[in-house]
């Protein structure tokens, strides 16, 4: 990422708001962390079902978890954008942050594949090679993102 492309962000009202109080950044971190836990927990149940570890018909449970995980992702997206606005140049050019963006994009593609190719499998007791691959890839991507140093470091400005 070219740092000059983002030079205007620290001058915005949003960036000013994020760094204006010693309480805003830690509050955003708490919201980000809790929604990340909700996201990861709900995705874990979905991934385990895709991998065949829970074969009972659980379409209504998984359907609710999918909506919950989408809501948690949107909260994480919003707080992540606020972190970026509040400390732009910490993230621009940071290889851990760049890797995180790539992993989020891959996870999004994985989710789209699930939605359009495997969504019906949740209504059955079936497990396919594709469902095991999607569930496994999802778990692997979260493991890589979690273990990468400083990829989730949101220390204040």
Image (spheres, rainbow, N blue to C red):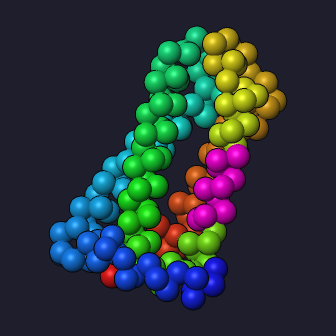
Q: Is residue 136 visible?
A: no
Q: Residue furthest right?
A: 129
Indicate the position of residue 85 as horizontal and vertical percent values: 41, 73
Question: Is the stretch drawn in magenta largely helix, strand or loop?
Answer: helix
- x then y, percent, for residue 34: 33, 49
Bounds of the magenta span?
Answer: 100-109
- Position of residue 87 relative to residue 57, above or below, is below
Q: Is residue 138 left or right of residue 39?
A: right
Q: Eyeballing the image, is 137 above or below 57?
A: below
Asked if residue 125 is positioned above or below residue 62 in the image, the reply reads above
Q: Seen in the image, is 151 located left or right of residue 98?
A: left
x and y, in percent, of residue 124 in the image: 67, 11
Image label count: 0
| Quadrant of the image containing the C terminus | bottom left
Give yes or no for residue 38 being in the magenta stretch: no
In the rendered image, the quadrant that contains the N terminus is bottom right
- Give the image quarter of residue 52: top right
Can residue 135 be seen by looking at this rendering?
A: yes
Magenta residue check for 102 = yes
* Residue 106 in the image, given as x and y percentages of width and height: 69, 53
Point 46% across, 24% down: residue: 64
């Amino acid at each position: 990422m070219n740092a000059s492309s983002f030079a205007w962000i620290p001058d915005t009202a949003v960036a000013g708001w994020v760094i204006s109080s010693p309480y805003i950044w830690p509050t955003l971190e708490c919201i980000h962390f809790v929604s990340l836990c909700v996201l990861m927990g709900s995705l874990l149940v979905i991934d385990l079902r895709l991998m065949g570890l829970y074969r009972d018909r659980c379409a209504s449970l998984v359907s609710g978890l999918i909506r919950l995980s989408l809501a948690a992702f949107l909260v994480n997206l919003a707080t992540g954008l606020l972190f970026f606005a509040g400390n732009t140049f910490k993230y621009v050019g940071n290889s851990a942050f760049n890797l995180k963006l790539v992993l989020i994009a891959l996870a999004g593609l994985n989710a789209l594949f699930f939605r359009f190719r495997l969504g019906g499998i949740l209504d059955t007791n079936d497990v396919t090679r594709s469902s095991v691959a999607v569930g496994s890839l999802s778990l692997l991507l979260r493991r890589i993102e979690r273990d990468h140093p400083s990829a989730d470091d949101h220390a204040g400005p």
